[in-house]
Image (cartoon, rainbow, N blue to C red):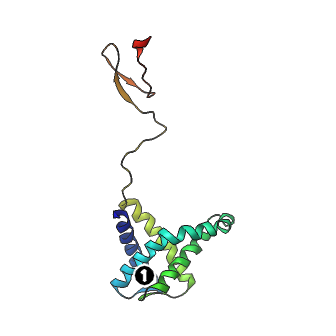
Amino acid sequence: MKNFIVVILINMFALFIVSGIFNGIEISSWQALIVSAIILSLINIYLKPIIKIIMLPVNFFTLGLFTLFINAFLLNIVEYLVKGFYIKDFATAFFGALMLSIIYLIVERFVIVRDKTFYNSSEPKVHYKESLDNENVIDVEGKYEDKKDN
């Protein structure tokens, strides 16, 4: 739930910036901004994956560029559903969706905290174990065999 609220806030920020950059995208009030961000978040979570699966062959042949048209279409759906959110034409929606994606990626990189455990698979794990001689050794391979059984 916390991540969903963060996603809504990021979408609000991105929609506010995009509406300031493009003259063809207008948000009449802050209530329309909040509702637009909520609906855009819900559409991106539930509807976008279904559309991307349906359009997978087209997206494959266009090397993923068709995703930009899907994003513009979804932004037009938000315009249709929210009073006070206006987009002039599809070209404005296309470039607005492109700018939304860029802003969202940049802000998400700095805001959403991922899992704090980090492990680089190219570096071996280091385990500290005691040997039979009671000296500290470093087991670089992650495998520690007990020599008492030999």
Q: Is residue 17 visible in this depiction of the protein?
A: no
- To which quarter of the image does residue 70 belong? bottom right
- To which quarter of the image does residue 135 belong? top left
Report the number of discs. Answer: 1
Measuring from the top left, give residue 12's x and y in whole percent: 38, 75
Q: Residue at x 38, y 66 (%)?
A: 4
Furthest-front residue in this view: 149
Measuring from the top left, give residue 139's x and y in whole percent: 40, 25
- Of 38 and 111, the residue lying toward us: 38
- To which quarter of the image does residue 114 belong? bottom left
Q: Residue at x 43, y 64 (%)?
A: 106
Measuring from the top left, give residue 1's x and y in whole percent: 35, 64
- Of 79 and 19, the residue lying toward us: 79
The quarter of the picture where the C terminus appears is top left
Residue denoted by label 1: 19
Q: Residues within 10 Å of mark 1 (few under 14, many from 20)?
A: many
Secondary element at tag 1: helix
What is the three-letter code of the residue carrying label 1? Answer: Ser
- Of 19 and 85, the residue lying toward us: 85
